[in-house]
Image: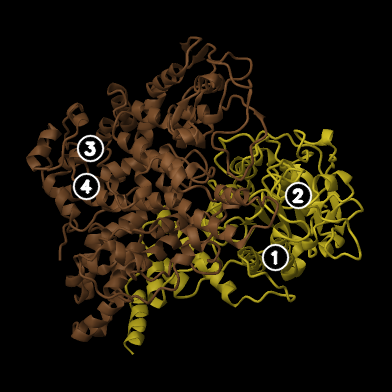
Chain colours: A yellow, B brown
Amino acid sequence: MQRRVFVKSGALALVTMGLSPRFLRRTAFGMELPAARKGKVLVCLFQRGAADGLNVVVPHGEQAYYAMRPNIAVPRPSASAPLSAIDLDGFFGLHPSLAPFKPLYDRKLLGIIHAVGSPSTTRSHFDAQDYMESGTPDDKATTDGWLNRYLAVHGTCDECKLQGAATGAGSPDRGSAFRAVAFAPQTPRILEGPSPTVAMNSLDEFSVRATGTQAERLEALYRTGSADIVHATGTETFDAVRMLRSANPQQYQPANNATYPRSQFGQRLKQIAQLIKADVGLEIAFADVGGWDTHVNQGGATGQLAQRLDDFAQSIGALVTDIGDRIGDVTILSMSEFGRMVKENGNGGTDHGHAGAMFVIGGDVHGGKVHGHWPGLQPEQLYEGRDLALTTDFRAVFSEVTARHLGARRLDAIFPGYTQGPPLGLMG
Amino acid sequence: MPTPFPRGRSAMVTVRVLLFPVVGGLTMMGCAAHVSRSQSTMSPLPPTSDAGRELTADQQVLQVINRLTFGARPGEAAQVRAMGVDRWIGRQLNPESIDDRDANAFVARFPTYAASIGQLQSDYPPPAKVLLARRAAAGANNGPVTGEDSMATRVARRAANRVVLDLQTIRVARAEISQRQLQEVMTDFWLNHFTVYDRKGAQMRYYLPDFDRDVIRPHALGKFRDLLEAVAKSPAMLFYLDNWESAADSTEPTMAPRPGQRTFARAPQGDGALTPPRRRRELGLNENYGRELLELHTLGVDGGYTQQDVINVARALTGWSIARPQEGSGFRFRPQFHDAGPKVVLGHALPAGRGIEDGEDVLDIVARHPSTARYIARKLCQRFAGDAPPQELVDRAAATFTRTDGDIRQVVWTIVTSPEFYARSAYRSKVKSPFEVVVSALRAVDAAPDTTPRTAQIIARMGEPIFGHQAPNGYPETGESWMNTGAILNRINFGLAVAAQRIPGASLDRWPDTRALMTAPRAAQVDGVVASILGGDASPDTRAILLSGEDPLLAAAGPTGDEATDAAAAGTRGTSRPSPDTTSGTRSASRPASIDGAMAGSAMSADGMEADDMVGTNGGQAAGRGGFGRLPSLQGLAQVVGLALGAPEFQRR
């Protein structure tokens, strides 16, 4: 009873206390949300801990693979054994837990690059992740991440600020508050830098934790008063909250019977799909997933690594199913800081290695193919006598994806110091 | 109801025109604390003048509190004003003279903070090492990991995590309750200037308490040269920037023959104990620390050095390394890795055939380089005076740096007694960092310090994890860099959570004004909250919005006993009303844990192996849960407090 009175009078007070006309126009009379545009989206997925590329995309045509991994190799493809590699091209096969990827490969949506990674010799997780995210191997002085540099140079951020001022945040082009979203507790290194990005654990977090007039008053605090950066950012924030609310994330139902794993990774990919489908101006999405540092007891066709891959493939498979035709606008790119030693260790696991494998999925991808150059696994073909050698620099992949999928032109600014080679043919 | 700063009052208080021997002044004030020996040798602070200060006396007090502390506690402004700003600053610049028993008692609760690096390594071994040792003992290298193995690993992980979590807890609590506020601000400044990252590798955690306790704090207001050397010899920095494994290239002579020349079998502390003995690998020159020493720690990126200087600085510092764990993991100079060839650094020749003196000479050279004076002065001006400090001020601060041979205390004094510091354009010109927002809010409501890492995790969620900045440049000193959409939401929601008493230690019951304001009319509540939380200074718009929650019908009737009870109930939801002297620790520990899961979202891990390392037990369960949970609808005084903490004015200092 009292509360009803309170709410009414609170709203009345807002209207009668002489707030600026701009504020009234935008709240009391309803704010017009900018028309969203369906744009290209890049989803970057980081497998932290160094995924074992050789057991993920299995070179079942290599006798040396089976010789060096007597306990943990994934068996050669066999129609009679479900727990064997899923053949792709007679030489490579997918780990059986990656079964959801096979139809994507057959539909030519999934491309694979093998023997890819960082040219740096480091076997430190920290350094290698740092390099893959800064985009400048062996240069620790880089303070921003390559995705942030992309955001900064593509369509230039000054331009977006101008647009933001004229049309409000959430303008369809470069000004969306949701242009770059990381589902992570903090902004990951790959997105660090001057361009605005949002990091959150879940879409749920992106709201004001207050009800009714309290929320309105908080909004009014930022919509009135001086035109400094705090007020301006606050205004953008409330616009963004409104925009997200209109997309109604709480009521989300995945389409096409897509079923996401209940894991954190699965739930994050589900929210990325929500953002893609809500047309809120998402251009870059990021999520990471751990558990790949399999020094002990990693297993073969089943076991620890297989479980990680189950979650990984089912989550990505669900996202592709869920977004349906939008896969034409979306590219999913997976990465991991380095691969693992060819020879298994004394603990049924593998130690830190060099090159690994990446997945690229989407309508713009030249799929149905394992790209790159296979260096072989004979002793003399190995890097430092122990690891899969590197034949493709990760920057070649990142460059091609950002250029061909997102239309980035300033690759020299995104990957400073890197000399672009001939195209990999990875993007269609 | 105290309203210490009625608005619009003109500056009629004469600030002490001359401030002379600060030490004498302290004795006069009857501070009981011991006077350290170093203090007696401290050069006296030069006299000041308040000529040219544009801010009113009240605004000067606010400016000083905003910039030299982590925000006003109730009654603090009145104390500063009574003492006079310059005298108060002089006292803060001599932190040893300030009794800090509450903060010291808090710190003493954490054995991990007092322990040596070696002790920590043996008491809290890395979980991976525990697992490997168990399997080796059981002769089960190839068998499956048993449930007992997993349990033992989990227990070990939790224990090892404590080392960093305790340290983060202490950082927040000290900022909140220490009487030596400027010492805390400067510790924060230098820990960020000389940033290190807690997940660089499995052993980094063992180096961090030492870094905070013995490297940064003792020198935070001392001589820059001493601070620089303490950092250069700290295991934390040696490890973070790789200098511990930097060695002379094979073409250079070394101080001693290397066993198995050019290679060694195992890093002193291996990165991640699960890695079996590393392949023998080539050791060589690592320029990482040498470069950052010049670019980030001293001269600055435009400080006038060349790539050859970087190489030669790195060569001079070869052999500066870390002792093995069984030797205590302290600083260790390794002559067999030191490049004993001749070098030229920034125009100074370092002769051949020397050892650790090479590195010490380099520290002398860079600490006294004019670019360093400018670079450090500018950064301090940014912290204290504003994001874009006037060049004249930077020049004067740099001149003080040079004249006093890098006496940090004197440089700070130059800055915070300058007319530029008290210019109108400097007033509330800085945007608070997340750390500053959280701590200043807790100070404003006189919260008890959190004995758990939860408050530190909130700060991390807001974008400033303590010891969690990956790159060597540290967090930005420019406040405006902290402004983005996610940040505003986090700040607003944090303010609401404080007002709803969902933050450990924050209870409006502790707030001296609560009793008086609880039943007061809205206008009086707003005045009180503006005075206490917004320094008495809110824009007319903000004041109007704060006032707008008033229910005209209720206001007309005046507060009745029932309503007062309602308001109190809303304000203290979920807790019994404790007496003011209830010990903070037990209360905060038993708070409703609504923020727990959400704050503990599994950390972005630098090493997949440690994916749930940072936050202990709750990692991974937070997906889908909101940052601050669902907050109760706030009423009465709590509502005004929530609005004030979420207001734009509170985001600035």
Mark 3 sits on what residue?
B93
Chain letter for mark 3: B
Mark 2 sits on what residue?
A53
Q: Tell me the kind of residue under disc 1.
A: Ser
**Percent x, y of residue A197:** 55, 54
* SS type, badge 3: loop
**Mark 3 touching mark 2, by CB under 8 A?**
no
B518 horizontally vs A1: left or right: left
* Nearer the observer, A427 or A350: A350
Q: Tell me the kind of residue under disc 4.
A: Asp
Mark 1 sits on what residue?
A315
* Mark 3 nearby-residue class (10 Å; few <14, some 14–19, many ≥20): many
Name the residue located 65 percent from the left edge and 76 percent from the top edge: A253
Mark 4 sits on what residue?
B100
* SS type, badge 1: helix
Q: Tell me the kind of residue under disc 2.
A: Gly
Number of the front mark, 1 or 2: 2
Q: CA distance from mark 1 to mark 2?
A: 19 Å
Q: CA distance from mark 4 to mark 2?
A: 56 Å
A355 horizontally vs B555: left or right: right
Farthest front residue in view: B138
Residue B398 location, quadrant: top left
* Mark 1 nearby-residue class (10 Å; few <14, some 14–19, many ≥20): many
